[in-house]
Image (cartoon, rainbow, N blue to C red):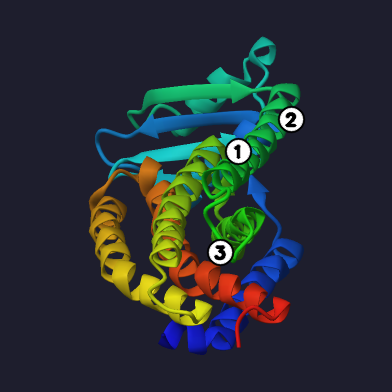
């Protein structure tokens, strides 16, 4: 019952997180990777030990190619730049420069290049995928809770779920904006995963509310929601902690290429569980309170 009674506090916290995220979008912006804006990425390995990043940057600067260099593993670098023109041998020139005039042994692990048109198309499809998933979830919940959710209209479950899902997308994206992390296709996959995990928790809680309404465990709606939360709270927290332990292990000891992905899922799992327990159900009570159904 504490969660329901103190719901204004949790609304304030969620509002603050969303506002901070929006400020991050405005002031820092989202740093789209080559997947969404076009460009090239080269992963280079130095078997005998990699040079420091400043040395590599100085070696590439005469080429007139602005490159972002990131450490990968113990002896490798990821080099991101604009699309390299193969007809001008820019790719070969980067490899030659990365060998520091032949003094360093270097192996190319991978090379990907995406044109700006394809990048724009991928970005559009990513937004469409996110919107389609959210709409699909809303329609499913409205359908699943039809005719059995009195005194709550089924559309309210769908609406509140949409609010919670938007919260679960905006906050992790805002954290990535503040941290200056790159937004790529793996980021979109992470958001879709967060949506799936979050809505699963929300549906579990809402389904318990629905069952308790049918059982008429209380004449007071807010008390019914509070008891439903108590019945599902331990399960939600234990499930989240189990997954987060795995993600934390992947973040600390996993490869560099999946570190941002695991960080996104860590943030998303925490925020998704929070919204399911501390935001969605209290919102349900708030809407019924304003309607006059709950005293």
Q: Which of disc 2 and disc 1 is earlier in sequence?
A: 2
Q: Nearer the viewer, residue 253 or 245?
A: 245
User: In this image, 36 relative to 73: left or right?
Assistant: right
Closer mark to the observer between disc 1 and disc 3: 1
Return the mark for residue 95: none
Work out whether 22 lies above or below 39.
below
| 295 on left or right of 75 | right
| Residue 12 in which image quadrant | bottom right
The secondary structure type at the circle numbered 1 is helix
Name the residue rendered at 67%, 53% in the picture: 30
Q: Name which residue lies at 49% across and 52% down.
A: 54
The spot of residue 260 in percent (x, y) is 44, 50
Say whether disc 1 or disc 3 marks the residue closer to the N-terminus: 1
Image coords of residue 203 (percent x, y) = 45, 54
Which residue position holds label 3? 175
Image x and y of residue 189, in percent: 49, 39
Query: Does 203 sit above or below residue 227?
Result: above
Tag on residue 120? Answer: 2
In the picture, the quarter occupied by the C terminus is bottom right
**Closer to us: 238 or 161:** 161
Residues under labels 3 and 2: Cα distance? 23 Å
Q: How many other residues sit within 10 Å of disc 1, few (<14), some (14-19) or many (≥20)?
A: few
Whole-angstrom CA distance, mark 1 to mark 2, is: 24 Å
CB contact under 8 Å: marks 3 and 2: no
């Amino acid at each position: 019952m504490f969660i329901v009674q103190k719901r204004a506090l949790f609304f304030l916290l969620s509002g603050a997180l969303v506002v901070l995220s929006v400020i991050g979008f405005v002031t820092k912006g989202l740093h789209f990777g080559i997947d969404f804006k076009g460009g090239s990425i080269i992963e280079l390995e130095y078997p005998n030990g990699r040079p420091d990043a400043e040395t590599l940057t100085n070696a590439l600067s005469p080429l007139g190619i602005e490159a972002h260099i990131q450490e990968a593993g113990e002896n490798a670098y990821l080099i991101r730049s604009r699309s390299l023109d193969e007809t001008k041998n820019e790719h070969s020139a980067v490899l030659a420069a990365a060998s520091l005039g032949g003094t360093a042994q270097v192996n190319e692990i991978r090379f990907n290049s995406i044109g700006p048109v394809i990048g724009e198309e991928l970005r559009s499809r990513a937004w469409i995928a996110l919107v389609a998933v959210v709409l699909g979830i809303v329609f499913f919940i409205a359908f699943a809770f039809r005719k059995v959710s009195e005194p709550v209209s089924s559309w309210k479950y769908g609406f509140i779920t949409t609010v919670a899902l938007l919260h679960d997308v905006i906050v992790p994206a805002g954290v990535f904006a503040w941290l200056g992390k790159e937004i790529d296709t793996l980021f979109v996959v992470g958001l879709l995963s967060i949506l799936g995990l979050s809505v699963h928790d929300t549906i579990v809680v809402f389904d318990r509310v629905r069952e308790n309404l049918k059982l008429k465990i209380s004449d007071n709606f807010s008390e019914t929601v509070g008891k439903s939360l108590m019945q599902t709270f331990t399960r939600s927290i234990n499930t989240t902690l189990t997954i987060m332990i795995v993600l934390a292990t992947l973040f600390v000891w996993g490869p560099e290429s999946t570190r941002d992905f695991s960080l996104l899922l860590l943030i998303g799992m925490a925020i998704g569980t929070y919204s399911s327990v501390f935001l969605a159900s209290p919102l349900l009570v708030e809407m019924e309170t304003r309607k006059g159904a709950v005293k």
